[in-house]
Structure formats: C-alpha cells, structure tokens
Amino acid sequence: MTDLRTNYIISHGYAESGRLHLQQWLWKMQMGWDLHPSIKLPEDGELRIADHGCGNGCDWQPHICFTLANSEFPRAWIISMAGELEDAQLQRAVLTGFDISAVHFPAPENLPGNVNLKVLDAFVDPLPEELVGKFDVVHVRVFTAVVKNGNPAQLIANAVKMLKPGGYFQWDEMDSESLKAIPPQPSVSAAETQEMLDTSLVSARSAMSLDYSWIPRLGSLFEQHGLDVLADFRMDVKKEFRKPMTDSLLMVLGHIAKIAVRDGCMVGTDKNWEELWNNSGAEIENGVSVTTDMLVCVGRKRS
C-alpha cells in the first residue's frame, strides 16, 4: 500500500519541487554561475562531479522533508551543471547525484545522458570504498535542516574522502539566523513580519532541535578537515530578487508551521501562528521582503 506521507501528490511534492527549481534560478541569477570561478576543472581525463541531496534528501518527518532538506527532484543544480558542461562540449563529464532515498528520483530516461542518481546517506560512516578519491568536485546546497546536532563534520569528512587529490568541495548555504524583514521604504512597517520570523526560528529550534551556529564557521570547518579555503563569503540577495526569495521563504515557513504549531501556538512560544501569519501578510502586501544571507564556501583538497 502506498505511504500517503511520501506519495508525491498527497504530500504536495510537486509544489515543493517547483519552489526548489525557483531556488536554483535564484542562486544562478544571484551568482551568475553554478561552480565558483575559483574551481578549475581538469583539462583532460574523465571529469566526475558529485551532488549531495539530489532526491528527497531527508530521512525523517516525510511530510515536510521536501522543504527542510532543500532537495530538487533531482536537484536543479545538477541539471543546470550538466547543461553547462554539454554546452562546453565536455562529453567526458559524469555527474552523480546522491540522496538518502530514491523515492523521488525521476525515471532514468528523463535525465540528461551524463547524469545518474544513486542512494547514499551523506553522513554515512564508513564511506563506501568505491567512492573514495573518485570525484573532481563535490557539491552541497542548503543542508541547514539536515545537519544533525549542529555538526556537519561527518559530511565534510566524507566529501573530502570522495575528492581526488586537488579536487574541490563547494557548499552553498542560507544562514537561517540572518532571516530578516526588509521594508521597501522607512515609512512602511516590517515589525510584525520580523516578529513572525523570530518566532519561527525559536520554534524550529525547539520542534526540530536545530542549531545554526555551524553555518558562519564553514570556512574554519573546511580548514579543520585539511582543505585549503579558496572562497568563503556571504551576501544579501540583490533587491531585484527579494520578491522570489520572499515567496520561497514563506513556503518554507509554512511547512515548518505544519510541525511546529501546537494548539494554535508555535512550539516553544506563546505566539499564535495564525495571528502572526496574518499580521505579517498585511505588511508583505505593502512590499515588505523576507530575506536571508546566502553563503558560499569553496575548499580544495591538497594534492
């Protein structure tokens, strides 16, 4: 019998897939690239790229896993990357997407010829021997709610093991601690929206035991695992992309509310969710944006 919690239609997987393709568009438009310019691909031999979290990316809370793991059915990043490499006539490139479950993998016939998808827990220990030292690039994006106990060490260690000597690890992240409401002009209030964001963060920490303190430390964590850090920066979303980011983040907050509301109030608070949501909605209709900092960290494995 079909598990209705993971059924694509019942769980609204199609809606989350659309949001995450929007998220990929947002990252691409903001940055202008899929791979950071510091990453120099080898000029000869087979090129192998790995992307973690390409399917449903979550082994818990099936009804909200689409949002929290930020996977992209398969991740739009790997599809975009495959197209770029094809345009560059790099026929020797092989891209592998990994996820903890194959539930939402598309039919292989619908994938680009240079893309394949496999089941793998990014935090597995030990890492399967056949993956050690095989990849030129390993990529991770927005694992905020996948990292357990605020500790991404095992994921980073696995990524380093997967890399060939001289290979690159790129991690794109959004810093939830930086969630903020931005008015279009000083005369427009954003106080209700900021209260909704602050309350949602408190509740998410309580309901899902989330700890975001590792996010600003990605660069130092890379160094602790022997990587030479080539890029480590954060940025505000460009003002012309505030609206799509607002829409995307509101969908995330709506999903969080599904598990973080008890008796009408946000877990860990005495705040009524419907009241918070309605009050912030009035401000957002007046042009208030919801944004969060975007971070990129790139490290290179020593030869």
Image (cartoon, helix red, strand yellow):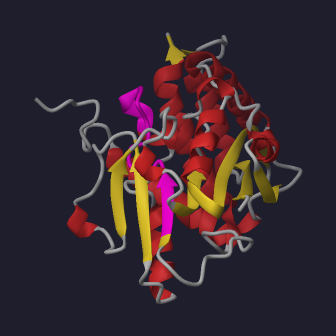
- Splitting the image into 4 quarters, where does residue 209 fall? top right
Q: Does the magenta stretch include residue 259?
A: no
Position of 120 with respect to 146 (left or right) is left
Q: Using the image as rendered, state which of residue 287 and residue 223 is in the foreground.
A: 223
Where is residue 244 drawn, in percent x and y? 60, 59
Q: Where is residue 98 in the image (x, y as percent from the top left)?
A: 42, 50
Q: In this view, does 116 lie to the left or right of 275?
A: left
Which residue is pictured at 34% across the width and 51% down the height? 118
x and y percentages locating residue 111 in the rendered image: 30, 68
In the depicted structure, whether residue 73 falls above or below residue 31: above
Q: Quadrant of the N terminus?
A: top left
Task: Answer with the quarter of the image where residue 139 lies.
Answer: bottom right
Res 179 quadrant in image: top right
Residue 249, percent from left and from top: 59, 45
Residue ranking furthest to the left: 1
Residue 77 in sight in this render: no
**In the drawing, does residue 67 fall left or right of residue 231?**
left
Relative to 263, is 217 above or below? below
Decide whether residue 58 is among the magenta residues.
Answer: yes
Q: Which of the pair 99/270 is nearer the observer?
A: 99
**Segment colored magenta:** 48-65
Q: Residue at x 69, y 69 (%)?
A: 36
Classify the position of the C terminus by image quarter.
bottom right
Work out whether residue 15 or residue 176 is closer to the camera in this orientation and state it. Answer: 176
Q: How many labels does the image show?
A: 0
- Res 52 seen here: yes
Q: Residue at x 74, y 55 (%)?
A: 297
Residue at (39, 39) in percent of width and height? 100
